[in-house]
Image (spheres, rainbow, N blue to C red):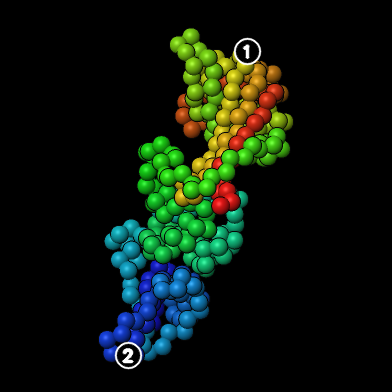
Amino acid sequence: MRAHLGDQLVVESPATGASGRDGEIVGLHHDDGTPPYDVHWSDTGQVTLVFPGPDAHIRHLEHQTGAAQGLDRPGDGTPNPGDIGRRVADERRRQGLSRTETARRARMAPNYLAYLEEQPADPSLATLINLAAALGTSVAALRGGGIDLPPGRGQALVHPRLQDLGPDECRARLSTHGVGRIALSTPDGPAVLPVNYEVIDDAIAFRTAPDSVPASAAGKEVAFEVDHLDEAMSQGWSVLAVGPARLVTEPDAVRRLADHAHTSPWAGGDRETWVSIRPIRLTGRRISAGDR
């Protein structure tokens, strides 16, 4: 008996006419695919170590059939993740979770999680449900559903609680970098635009093109907002910073910002004009489940 990660182990029932049991193989203990296996059972959702008996057989799924579908591991070991794997890895890293901790929460073997993140795998619905629960998101989000729709389309909580966030928690949620929105007045009226930002020395900084609308924020008092929505739980938070914006022109300051930047602007192009916002007011709110 030999199996691949993602195959199914089917155990036939000894009783005539009774249904058997099946589970997804989420861990291998031998490189040649021989038993034992870590199996994620579809009926209980538990992962157990299994030494298959004579009543068990392997169901090889189509996504494991090989090079004809382009799903073999690259010969040099280079990760080649699929869309689901990329979304799982991105959300895990965003939350600062290790693979080991995420796998524990999702009740799967860490090496299977590594496989999902690094290869174009096709995990079962049960696996996606557990991963979504472990990451605090939804199966639809891991599959990319609604990616082109605005967030927050789910139903409100039955008993929501709205809380103000203190300055320290607001700074913590701003973290070190991300994507936020700058709101400013322009000759054509108010504008709100998304930008990649960095937080350095309690100042919010972003790169943009010299003739862009965000660059015109320099010399004005502006608002800067970041938020996060949990679509699965209809919860979320937002932080609003208000303060003067200025162009950063000092060579040493520009170099320091560039050296500490976590990513290039997603919009691409020539965006080397740095704008810094020094908040004079920092507020935030969080919606969570309240007491009944």
Q: Residue at x 59, y 19 (%)?
A: 222
Q: Which residue is mark 1?
A: 219
Q: Is residue 102 above or below residue 44?
A: above
Q: Residue lying farthest front?
A: 292
Q: Residue at x 47, y 84 (%)?
A: 51
- Three-letter amino acid code at the position of disc 1: Gly
Q: Residue at x 64, y 37 (%)?
A: 164
Q: Is residue 258 above or below residue 248?
A: below
Which image quarter holds the N terminus?
bottom left
Question: Secondary structure beneath disc 2?
Answer: loop
Q: Nearer the viewer, residue 32 or 227?
A: 227
- Three-letter amino acid code at the position of disc 2: Ala
Q: Nearer the viewer, residue 261 or 26?
A: 26
Q: Which residue is mark 2?
A: 15
Residue 246, position as x, y percentages in the image:
64, 17
Q: Nearer the viewer, residue 198 or 167?
A: 167
Q: Is residue 192 above or below residue 82?
A: above
